[in-house]
Image (spheres, rainbow, N blue to C red):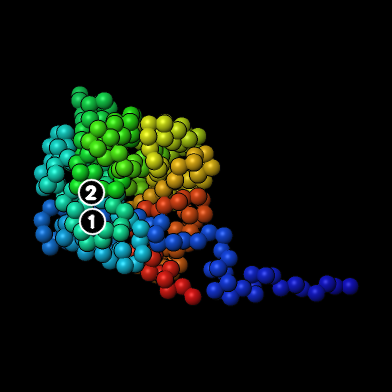
Amino acid sequence: MGYPVRRTRRLRRTPQIRRHVAETRLHPARFVLPVFCIPGRDTAEPIGSMPGHYQLSPDRAAALAKEAARAGVGGLILFGIPSAKDEVGSGAWDPAGPVPESIKAIKDAAPELVVWADVCLCEYTSHGHCGVVADGEIDNDATLPLLARAAVAYADAGADLVAPSDMMDGRVAAIRTALDEAGHTGTAICSYAVKYASAYYGPFREAAQSAPAFGDRRTHQMDPANRREALIEVDLDVEEGADLVMVKPAGPYLDVVASVRAHTQVPVAAYQVSGEFAMIEAAAERGWIDRDRVVLESLTGIARAGADLILTYFAVDAARMLEELP
């Protein structure tokens, strides 16, 4: 005697009910949009490998910030490309540099946004490395006060949060001390605690003009083969004063995102990097995937792994897609 086939519950869920009871839900307020800042006015230079994204002068960055705020995006993270570079990256702490000027313009245009400022020297050094180079190698300790100086310059301009991405040892403590001494005790630090030496950063290096002139960054960024090391890095940075920690890249490292989320009590951010963005756009351009569905599915996977915040170049688009869902 056969048994009647029972229809599964998922087949009886309407789109509205599925969205209502979903275990993981995306919210635009958890998105952070990366923005590339350049000097000047009314300037938007297209980034070839990142369709739809530009190097923006402060006024154009402010206009984008207003657009992001209207879409419900929670924050922006700013990267600077100076007009001139030198051996120590002094443009990073120039109070009239592209990031401080953009912070002030964005704060005027969209004060509800949380403004992040990336802290690294690679965009500002003539050699493209993340710190001071001595005898062909990065001098970790000589780099720390320069990173701290840049962080204070961004806080002086009004940044809510600074995000050191350099991966120097001790940089969180150096930045926290400098911020506190400058009176910026309320400025938060999101450490790129778990930043891998990844091949997914190529388009970013075009956008930020930060490719190293020699060597690579495997001496200070993490080995893609390592997961347990990520938890050590997180603990060290939290002990030094990090308020949030980040995993970068996101998509290829969802297991690491999940491990970090289970390990620490501080908020966890994950960065869907330029290579992830570019691959989705390239496949969609060729008609191989449904772009919008893949965008939301990829972001849902990052959130499901445990990310509290997602840095993504799709932030504005994804916010609008979520608004249009039934």
Label whose residue precedes the other's in the sequence (2 or 1) = 1
For residue 19, side relative to residue 165 (left or right)? right
**Residue 77 circle label:** none
Packing grade of label 2 (10 A; few <14, some 14-19, many >=20) is many
Packing grade of label 1 (10 A; few <14, some 14-19, many >=20) is many
For residue 135, side relative to residue 297 (left or right)? left
Which residue shows up at 14% across the image and 37% down it? 90
* Foreground of the two, 230 or 16: 16
* Foreground of the two, 239 or 1: 239
Q: Position of residue 164 (x, y in %)?
A: 30, 40
Q: Position of residue 222 (x, y in %)?
A: 39, 36
Q: Which residue is mark 1?
A: 107
| 49 vs 232: above or below | below
Q: Amino acid at mark 2?
A: Gly
Q: Position of residue 213 (x, y in %)?
A: 20, 38
Residue 172: quarter of image: top left
Residue 52: quarter of image: bottom left
Q: Secondary structure at mark 1?
A: helix
Q: Quadrant of the N terminus?
A: bottom right
Which residue shows up at 23% across the image and 56% down it? 107
Q: Amino acid at mark 1?
A: Lys
- Can residue 204 be seen by looking at this rendering? no
Q: Secondary structure at mark 2?
A: loop
Q: Which residue is mark 2?
A: 158
Which residue shows up at 58% across the image and 72% down it? 17
Residue contact at pointers 2 and 1, CB within 8 angstroms: yes
| 146 vs 123: above or below | above
Which residue shows up at 12% across the image and 53% down it? 39
Q: Position of residue 45 (x, y in %)?
A: 17, 59
How far apart marks 2 and 1 lie (CA) works out to 7 Å
| 301 vs 129: above or below | below
- Can residue 258 be seen by looking at this rendering? yes
